[in-house]
Image: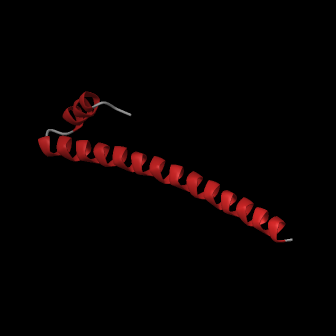
Amino acid sequence: MATDKEVESIIEEKYDDGDMTVIVRELLELQEKHEGLQTDYDELEKERDQLEYDISELRDAINDIQE
């Protein structure tokens, strides 16, 4: 991912408008937040899958005991 200075440099070359720097910086921050949320979501999915597996194992154990 580009650093703030790299982004500012690109913007200064292509646009002579300070507002674009703010917009790009905000977009980069949103992208980082999105990546963090995606990581959290992936971890929660793994935990859910593990819990579903554990529940299945417990049900099987209960059924074995009841038989």
In the rendered image, residue 34, in percent from the top left (x then y), is placed at 39, 50
Q: Residue furthest bottom?
A: 66
Tell me if residue 42 can be seen.
Answer: yes
In the rendered image, residue 37, in percent from the top left (x then y), is placed at 41, 51
Side of 63 where 39 appears, left or right:
left
Residue 55 vertical position relative to residue 18 in the rendered view, above or below: below
Look at 24% across and 42% down and name the residue there: 25
Q: Nearer the viewer, residue 10 or 35?
A: 35
Residue 31 vertical position relative to residue 63 in the rendered view, above or below: above
Q: Residue furthest right?
A: 67
Look at 31% across and 43% down and name the residue there: 28
Q: What colour scheme governs how the chains and residues are painted in the rendered image of this protein? A: secondary structure
Look at 31% across and 49% down and name the residue there: 30
The quarter of the image holding the N terminus is top left
Q: How many marks?
A: 0
The quarter of the image holding the C terminus is bottom right
Residue 13 vertical position relative to residue 52 in the rendered view, above or below: above
In the rendered image, residue 32, in percent from the top left (x then y), is placed at 35, 43
In the rendered image, residue 23, in percent from the top left (x then y), is placed at 21, 47
Q: Quadrant of residue 8?
A: top left
Q: Quadrant of residue 13?
A: top left
Tell me if residue 17 can be seen.
Answer: no
Residue 17 vertical position relative to residue 5 in the rendered view, above or below: below
Side of 53 where 31 appears, left or right:
left
Look at 74% across and 59% down and name the residue there: 57
